[in-house]
């Protein structure tokens, strides 16, 4: 709300140069959006209803009588609006003293027109002789963005799929013909989602590339980097299942959860490769450095993978145990935290199993290809 000015999850901004046309477009948009499936209610701002006294200076008449614009503004400000001339102090309290004309002198346009203006020559000139006074209807609030007047249509939705709702709403709004110079744009959570999607579109590939470079810096082998990254999509299956089971839509929070899960799954793969390499090296040492046969190689891989069961179980228990209270929470902000934690909790059920079972099998195929 603070970032976009929209007090509802989704809002429509209508902007243009003329206030009346903007208000008319918001009301037409309100009627169109009420028929879109998923709309709980739609409300266009009612910014009319203000009553204003317009004082238009007649410059020719004012010049003939020696009255300047500053004289008129000073009288209007002091006589009608009032001026603070002093403050009353009572202990720690402060009260301002405002001085202006009596109510009888300013309770109607006719009375205000009779207010005298004293010129520099000492002449008294009626305000009505140098200005035109009229009561007119106007907007009670005027908003502007990007040098254009703007009005909002506030929307509360039954659907959590903002993207699907906006696509359906765009089809309904396409029936409204916009005059030249007038625009409609979405704001609220959808606007933030668009910004986040644009940022994630380059942030996720950059993260994967950086992780691959870090892995290469450790292994000095693109083949081993490929082994770790090959198991990564399979490790995320549990997170996808749990997000689907909880009926969470893909959002920024869910994307952050998957990024965290990818980091943990990568760590599982890296450590598993280290254990397999150590088990294979130890088996070769026992054989006097001779190449291992197929069955000896399989026994070494089984020994290396099984030695990772206890530390991996401890890691999974700590992560799941720390996130279960988040999944069970119902306090303020828990809806966001649940969507971050859901991929991690689901991924901790599949990532360890796949790194214990799938990665050793792929490692064996890779080593067999190198022996052949």
Image (cartoon, rainbow, N blue to C red):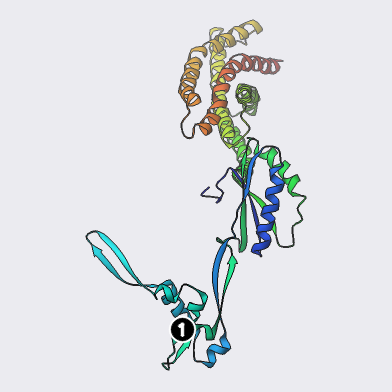
Q: Quadrant of the C terminus?
A: top right
Residue 303 seen in this snapshot:
yes
Quadrant in which residue 146 is drawn = bottom right
Work out whether 49 lies above or below 363. below
Work out whether 89 lies above or below 311. below
Percent of width and height locating residue 277? 56, 17
293 to the left or right of 341: right
Residue ID at (68%, 57%): 24
Work out whether 123 lies above or below 19. below
Farthest front residue?
Answer: 104
Percent of width and height locating residue 70? 47, 82
Percent of width and height locating residue 179? 74, 61
> Is 301 in front, or is 353?
353
Residue ID at (56%, 23%): 270
Quadrant in which residue 358 is drawn = top right
> Is 284 in front, or is 122?
122
Residue ID at (50%, 83%): 127
Percent of width and height locating residue 164? 70, 38
> Is 245 in front, or is 234?
245
Work out whether 94 lies above or below 100. above
Residue 266 seen in this snapshot:
no
Q: Secondary structure at mark 1?
A: helix
Disc tally is: 1
Name the residue that disc number 1 marks. 71
123 to the left or right of 276: left
Label 1 neighbour load within 10 Å: few <14, some 14-19, many 20+: some
């Amino acid at each position: 709300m603070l970032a976009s000015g929209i007090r509802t999850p989704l809002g429509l901004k209508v902007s243009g140069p003329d206030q009346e046309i903007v208000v008319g477009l918001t009301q037409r948009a309100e009627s169109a959006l009420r028929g879109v499936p998923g709309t709980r209610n739609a409300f266009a701002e009612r910014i009319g209803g203000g009553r204003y006294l317009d004082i238009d200076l007649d410059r020719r008449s004012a010049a003939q009588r020696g009255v300047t614009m500053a004289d008129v503004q000073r009288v209007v400000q002091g006589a009608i609006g009032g001026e603070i001339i002093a403050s009353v102090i009572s202990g720690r309290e402060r009260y301002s003293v405002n001085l202006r004309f009596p109510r009888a002198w300013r309770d109607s346009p006719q009375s205000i027109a009779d207010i005298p203006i004293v010129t520099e020559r000492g002449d008294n000139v009626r305000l009505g002789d140098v200005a035109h006074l009229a009561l007119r209807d106007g907007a009670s609030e005027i908003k502007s963005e990007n040098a254009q007047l703007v009005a909002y249509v506030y929307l509360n939705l039954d659907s959590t799929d903002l993207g699907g709702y906006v696509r359906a709403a765009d089809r309904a709004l396409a029936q409204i013909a916009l005059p030249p110079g007038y625009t409609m744009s979405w704001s609220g959570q959808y606007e933030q989602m668009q910004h986040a999607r644009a940022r994630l579109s380059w942030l996720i590939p950059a993260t994967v590339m950086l992780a691959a470079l870090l892995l290469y810096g450790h292994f000095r082998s693109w083949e081993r980097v490929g082994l770790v990254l090959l198991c990564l999509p399979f490790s995320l299956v549990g997170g996808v299942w749990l997000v689907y089971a909880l009926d969470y839509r893909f959002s920024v929070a869910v994307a952050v959860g998957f990024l965290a899960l990818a980091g943990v799954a990568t760590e599982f793969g890296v450590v598993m490769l280290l254990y397999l390499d150590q088990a294979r090296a130890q088996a070769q040492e026992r054989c006097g450095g001779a190449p291992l046969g197929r069955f000896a190689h399989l026994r070494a891989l089984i020994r290396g993978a099984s030695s990772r069961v206890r530390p991996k179980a401890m890691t999974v228990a700590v992560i799941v145990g720390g996130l279960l209270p988040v999944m069970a929470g119902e306090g303020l902000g828990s809806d966001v935290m649940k969507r971050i934690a859901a991929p991690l909790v689901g991924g901790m059920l599949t990532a360890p199993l796949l790194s214990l079972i799938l990665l050793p099998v792929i490692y064996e195929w890779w080593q067999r290809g190198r022996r052949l």
